[in-house]
Amino acid sequence: MYQAAETVSATLAAPLDETGLIRAAQNGDQEAFEQLVREYDQSVLRIAINILRSPDEARDVYQEAFLKVYRNLNSFRFDCSFHTWLYRIVTNICLDHLRRRKVRKEESTAVETSDGPVDRLLQVREEGPHSDPERQTWNQELAGGIAHALAGLTPRERTVFELRHYEGLRLRAIGDMIGTTEEAAKNCLFRATQKMRMSLETFV
Amino acid sequence: MTCPDAIKEIPNYCYGEISSETEEALESHLAGCSACQKELARHRKFLELLDERDPIFDAGLLVECRNNLSRAVRQQIAVESSHSAGWRGWHRAGEYLRDLSRVHIPFRIPVGAMALMALGFFGARYTPEKFGGVREALAEPMFSSVRSVEPNSSGQVQIAVDQTRRRLVSGTLQDPSIQELLVNGVTDGSNPTVRLRSIQILHEAPSNNADSEQVRLALLGALDHDPSAAVRLKALDGLKQFATDAAVRRALANALRKDDDPNVRVQAIDLLAKHHDDSIVGVLQGLVQREDNPYVRGQMTNLLEQFNASPGTY
């Protein structure tokens, strides 16, 4: 019983800490802001890399998103959780990038080399020269397959899939972030998983 | 529930995004439908396959992003300070930055980088609370290299110059700026000896002194990307203190999967053995089948036995 009470208080303490951090950052406490950044920045970078499939653009999104948070933190009124607010900023910036990219014609992460097309993103992930050829081939084939499957999704499907599968966010929260209903997010996820499965059929 | 309805609900079921009524209806349908059971098994396999995707991204990129953000925030503060306090140094920095908006676009990036370097330099020198315990000395003259040269419309020439000055910095391991430099040494050092020494010093730092998150990321990055097996082994040494962390354990499994140095794989197994973790049993069972080094295979088999799992159940 005593242990259960401790667990409950620990669970309740976490959001209070974050609230305290946000309030401190709103009052100009740089260290509190830095702690907030550290709390979420790996997820932010991962989301941006996986949605945009470009480490360079992800670097820009990271900076743009956290600077936006820094400048607008005072307007955060705790109407939603901080991570919902932050991820909404990040996904909107990512979707903006994707829209801009569409205007400039969708940029492929593949570049032509003398050995044929090479995916720049896979180069980043698989650049370790220490993999043996067999392992490297398997990793590259799988990573290439997943990258190809993700590239076949619409920006919205990719965003929903990324946030649900890799970030573990609830569909209700995702719907809220991208300005749609939970049901629409659910349908989007279904379409995304169907496309992904078809694309990765040879691996399953 | 019909088969098409069940198929539509299976992804939601696997993600736990299903109401209790639908869950009940689906499970009752599954109990009597072998085709949908197979579909569920295939979907689960698909989800497992997605999780095989390397979960680690380049830790160097994260460190770079953090450093860039830190500079950009300092820049923001500098501009704000120049407006409010009118402090001379920051005011000048602010003026300099405002001038950037008038710079011809191709020069914004290099000149911006210079401005940020300058701010970083001023920031380091004039924010004593940040660099409190660190002593630094200018050891070498400044090295310059011209990045770009371009005439502008007013008849002048704009030259972007990168300037590098070597500084000797000393301080204790408790100092966050020293820790940050060591982390940069792990991720950015072009010299393997620098990377090795940086890891060693971070590893030997009392855990309550180092920013463990930053250190952990740097070590994970070294384990994943460093071309030198000696550095990767040293990174594994440093990761011992984080051996119970789920992300570290995934990275260890990843090293087992893709590192071609058997010593690294053996050390990864040793670390995995320190904490019973059922979630990696499946991964190990798959890897033991593909492992070509008999000693490493033996170690993997021992580990599976330690986890009460059979190496033959793959």
Image (cartoon, coloured by chain):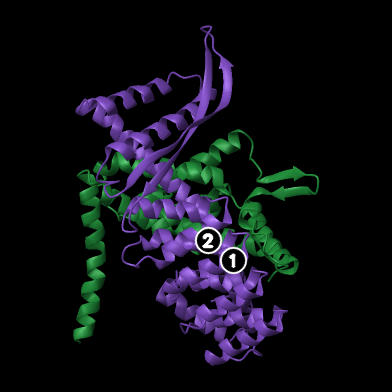
Chain colours: A green, B purple
**Circles 1, 2 touching at the beta carbon (< 8 Å):** yes
Q: Secondary structure at mark 1?
A: helix
Residue A153 in the image: x percent, y percent? 61, 53
Considering only vertical position in the picture, is B72 above or below B271? above
Tell me which amino acid carries mark 2. Leu
Rendered image: mark on residue B230:
1
Query: Is tag 1's residue or tag 2's residue first in the polypeptide sequence?
Result: 2
The answer to whether residue A65 of the structure is visible from this angle is no
Considering only vertical position in the picture, is A84 above or below B95? below
User: Residue sitting at 36 percent across and 60 percent down?
Assistant: B211
Residue hosting label 2:
B196
Label 2 marks a residue whose chain is B
User: Residue sitting at 21 percent across and 50 percent down?
Assistant: A24
The answer to whether residue A116 of the structure is visible from this angle is yes
In this orientation, which residue lies closer to the viewer: B181 or A42?
B181
User: Residue sitting at 39 percent across and 32 percent down?
Assistant: B118
Dot 2, how many residues are within 10 Å of its Cα: few (below 14), some (14-19), or many (20+)? many
Please identify the quadrant where the C terminus of chain B is shown.
bottom right
Residue B291 in the image: x percent, y percent? 69, 79
The residue lying furthest to the front in this view is B139
User: Residue sitting at 35 percent across and 61 percent down?
Assistant: B210
CA gap between label 1 and label 2 equals 8 Å
Q: Secondary structure at mark 2?
A: helix
Label 1 marks a residue whose chain is B
